[in-house]
Image (cartoon, rainbow, N blue to C red):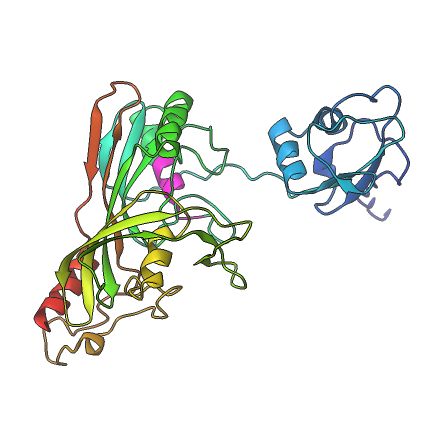
Amino acid sequence: MHPPTPPPSPPSPPPAGERPGRIEAADLAAGTELALDVDAESAGGRLDVFLARAFPDRSRSFLARAIDKGAVRVDGVTARASVKLKAGNVVRFVVPEPPRAGPEAEEIPLEFLHLDEWLAAVNKPAGMVVHPAKGNWKGTLAGALRWHLERAGGGLSQAGGPTRPGIVHRLDRDTSGVIIVARTEECHHALARQFERRTVEKTYLAITQGRPQFDRDEICLPIGIHPYQREKMAVRRDHPTSREAVTRFEVLERFRAAALVRVTPKTGRTHQIRVHLAAIGCPVLCDGLYSGRTVIEAGFVGLAADHPLATGPLLARQALHAARLALDHPVSRARLELAAPLPADMERMLAALRATG
């Protein structure tokens, strides 16, 4: 018997200084650095066009994202897609992770608030991630939507990329309530323009840990990336990542050490409501990032051990709910108002607060 033939070795990247021509990037490991010489034929052309010819198995958008992330340098300098190349330039390209396919369709129950051939609106439950991301590839809203909408006929817009089908705006994983998605590219762009122009009316309900000083107020504080905790945002002035942020709120009900507030953000920054309420000393109740608590037990609000509500934790996620969304339908132009009732866990929390004053 002859020994089995060993499998062929993967192709080695060309050494620095050697122009590779057409390369199948799929055959190269992510993180591999290639050095590509610019010859006279490619001189005067754009960097993105040069890369598109060198990597025919990769889309222009994929290569553009690699350039934006600083994975491409020309003569040692990070370059833009539009830079014009000269003969003799050396383009160094670090092969990025391959693009992931879109979310798999998953049979997960959803509560639809609106559904037509152009868009859909859902009452997202707390604990559900909106779209696939690192560490969260299953159980997403995008995967559930794909399952339901494929069976209803049609699908979702691909304008946001393969892992974000139909997604026009986001809700944090542990925020419940109204979220709208686009089913066509035209609708996607029309909805995105409304969010950009701030003509979409967004109303949230939140239970705060602590009582705001005023019954009504406007919080105008810039928000940027937290200086040392990358998963958090923070109020930051005069920082490159800082952006204007405006949040209005109204106290609907006051308790001994908490409040129910209606919040209307005028801008849409990441974690905006959570950061702003924390900034005035009244973080969203049970917000693990900004209040320091990840669960609320009956004893925290002073419930007696024999009270009917004291049978377990009262709340195990941030008490924030997207209660209402109003916008113009991209096709009919009619004003579309979407509302989601307060979920059971927040109702339970309010009942406990009312029981203890």
Q: Which of 10 and 89 is in front in this view?
A: 89
Viewer-proximal residue among 104 and 133:
133
Side (left or right) of 352 relative to 17 = left
Which residue is outermost to the front?
Answer: 238
Q: Quadrant of the C terminus?
A: bottom left
Residue 107 picture quarter: top left
Q: Answer whether residue 10 is visible to the viewer in this image.
A: no
Can you give x and y, in whole percent of width and height, for residue 299 in the image? 20, 79
Give the tally of numbered discs: 0
Residue under the image location 70 percent in, 36 percent down: 26
Q: Could you say which is closer to the camera, residue 342 or residue 209?
A: 209
Point 77% across, 21% down: residue? 45
Image coords of residue 315 (percent x, y): 25, 65
Q: In this view, does 279 lie above or below 121?
A: below
| Residue range (magenta) | 138-146
Q: In which quarter of the image is residue 143?
A: top left
Residue 344 visible: yes
